[in-house]
Image: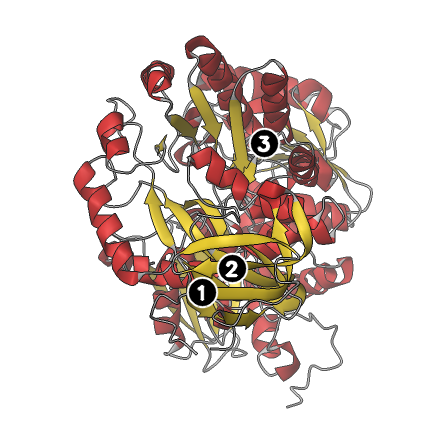
Amino acid sequence: MCDGSSDRPFFPHRHLLGIEGLSPDEITVLLDRSENYVEQNRRIDKKKSLLRGRTIINLFFEHSTRTRTSFELAGKRLGGDVINMSLSTSSIKKGETLIDTAMTLNAMHPDVLVVRHQSSGAVKLLSEKVNCAVINAGDGSHEHPTQALLDALTIRRRRGTLQGLQVAICGDITHSRVARSNIHLLLAMGARVRLIAPATLIPPGIEHLGAEVFHEMAAGLKNCDIVMMLRLQQERMHGGFFPSIREYFTHFGLDYPKLANAKSDALIMHPGPMNRGVEIDAEVADDFGRSVIREQVEMGVAVRMACLEILTENLDRPELRTN
Amino acid sequence: MAGTDEVPSLTAYVNARLIDPASETDSPGGVLTDGERIVAAGAGLFNSGAGDDARIIDCAGACLSPGLVDMRMYTGEPGEEHKETLATAGRAAVAGGVTSMVCLPNTKPVIDDMSTLEFIARRARKHGLAKVYCYGTVTKGLDGKELSEMALLSESGALAFTDGVKPVKDAQVLHRALSYAQPFGFVIVQHAEEPSLSAGGVMNAGETATRLGLAGTPVEAEIIMVERDIRLAKMTGGRLHFAHLSTAEAVDAVRNAKNAGLHITCDTAPPYFALNELAVGDYRTFAKLSPPLRAEKDRQAIIAGLIDGTIDTVASDHRPEDEEAKRLPFSEAAYGGTGLETLLPVTLELYHNGHMSLIDAISLITNKPAELMGLAAGRLEAGAAADLLVFSPEKGWKVTEDRLSSKSKNSPFDGRPVQGEVLQTIVDGRSVFRRGE
């Protein structure tokens, strides 16, 4: 029963379904563990055997290249067996329900299911029907916890702490699971959060989560330490939320004149994939000194290794069966 | 003792607390029935004994009221018999004390044709449980464009007209429906929801929806349609009724219209005065309803509307859905909840919470909906059908899957402790449900 790591700080959850509800200590456990893997991933020999004999299934109901690859690499670098399933194209079209798919996979005894689904709450529903650990790799417009964790790790490595930082999240907040997970994480860790978007892309009541809402980039970016841009999710939009891409970019796209309102050393972040010339100017995105967009991708693998490691450790803790 | 399948002759229901809202009676008393009819009802009816020839039913101090009248429910028959049939709906109804119910017309095929109406009436008669009545559609095939044959449907038994869970969204179509129906005296029942504003919405818009990442339906979708339709009713003199109001400002709009002398009525359903949007919790699809559960201030306003009479009646909004339709991610799950068996206890919360008297609460689900639908039901008077309900207003129980007779188990009140239990239900003098049997 004792796995030799009982002296380590403990993450008391069976699944990672979202950031909302996690304590600062729990978030710190995940970030600290991720830190270990950053160095390992930069070595030539990247492989460990911690997850040898463990099966990880990447179950993606929605198209993804980056997140799926990141989870796949994370699992493989820890020595686990990783299977990728893209269900947007197979059994869903044959009418199989989410629950049926979950039950079927569960019967194959995976250890971790990494799930992305286009509907908010779908990953939680699936987690109630399986015996393994479940990681939410993005559910609808709800949460994308590993993205928020990798953003936090990127910031922490650059700034030392999240406490007291002023962070602006800009763009399509309404449809963004990345925004929601980041709001919960940043506020929990003592950062201040501003949301900047046209009024049509700010969901009602979001200010009650503790963020401040702006509709103008210059005012919103004033003295910010971190500028997080979001991808405009046109595939989730029904009807016109703004008049044109040209007008959107002029008013809400990140370019140097708007960026000048932020602190001179403000970091520029983007969860990818970027729409250059839509939400972010190409030059700004590639600004070597300030853009940490590629670093975010690097941190992504480390964070996902940490999450896989911690949740598989927890599989041996029967007291977590019920949460 | 006579068998329950035969129509008993003289029967005396004695030793009851008689609740008859139509005659404003709440006192010890009883009811005497002969065959399918009530012969006499009143306080102190059997003070000098019930007579030797009558069969005696001792109510042992329980409440005796008219059987409940549910003015809006859905049965899956015809078309969705895997969710509910007329037989299972009938059993659920009598277990819930309902002796008359009015079915929504959005069956498959829809009730826009006399033959469907007659099919349902014939099937329901065969079961001999709660009495089944129907709405006809306002528009043919629920297409929102062409008017149904309202007069012919009415002659075949349609009580009123509605497109069910779909609003009549085209203002000109509703205008014509109200105009056409007016000289006939038909009631047009509207599900008030501006579809262009509610499109994609799966719960009440606001902080909870935003937190859950779900698309919201704003309260304005209901308010705008109610305000528009009140103007159309005023323009035509037509008889308009709003189904299941859920928002504070829609209730205000109806209150103002009534104060201005317009003959507009409305109802609500138990979820809208007993639950709010927080019941959705962590994506509970049993709490996914249409209209959606609203904010706490809306819930309070619905109660206020019931207290001051702005809201005329309460309907069960019974909408059975099978597991396949509810065990889905929230945004993909079906709307609706069962309600026949929780109509009485949840409506009694209005009494238990001190909002109104027992008789006023019972009135919302007996004589008032009967009057609105033009049904000779919901009252205890000589000559009326012997549709009776014996219940304990205090007895507590918990809403669970096992306890419900409906074929579908999607109660928004699942797990809720409630007060008020049906002991016996009598339809046309026959005992059709008795607790414990």
The residue identified by callout 2 is: B32
Give the structural element (helix, strand or loop) at label 3. Answer: loop
Which of these two is toward me, B2 or A80? B2
Q: Relative to B106, is A16 on the left or the right?
A: right
The residue identified by callout 1 is: B10
Which of these two is toward me, B337 or A273? B337
Q: Position of residue A157 (x, y in %)?
A: 71, 51
The residue identified by callout 3 is: A287
Tag 1 near tag 3, CB within 8 Å:
no
Give the structural element (helix, strand or loop) at label 2. Answer: strand
Which chain is home to disc 3? A
Q: Can you say whether B277 is above or below B222 in the image?
A: below
Tag 1 near tag 2, CB within 8 Å:
yes
Return the residue found at the far left: B115
Front tag of 3 and 2: 2
Which of these two is toward me, B99 or B259? B99
Crowd around label 2: few <14 · some 14–19 · many ≥20 (10 Å)? many
Tell me which residue sits at (50%, 39%) in the image: B369
- Say what amino acid the circle numbered 3 marks: Asp
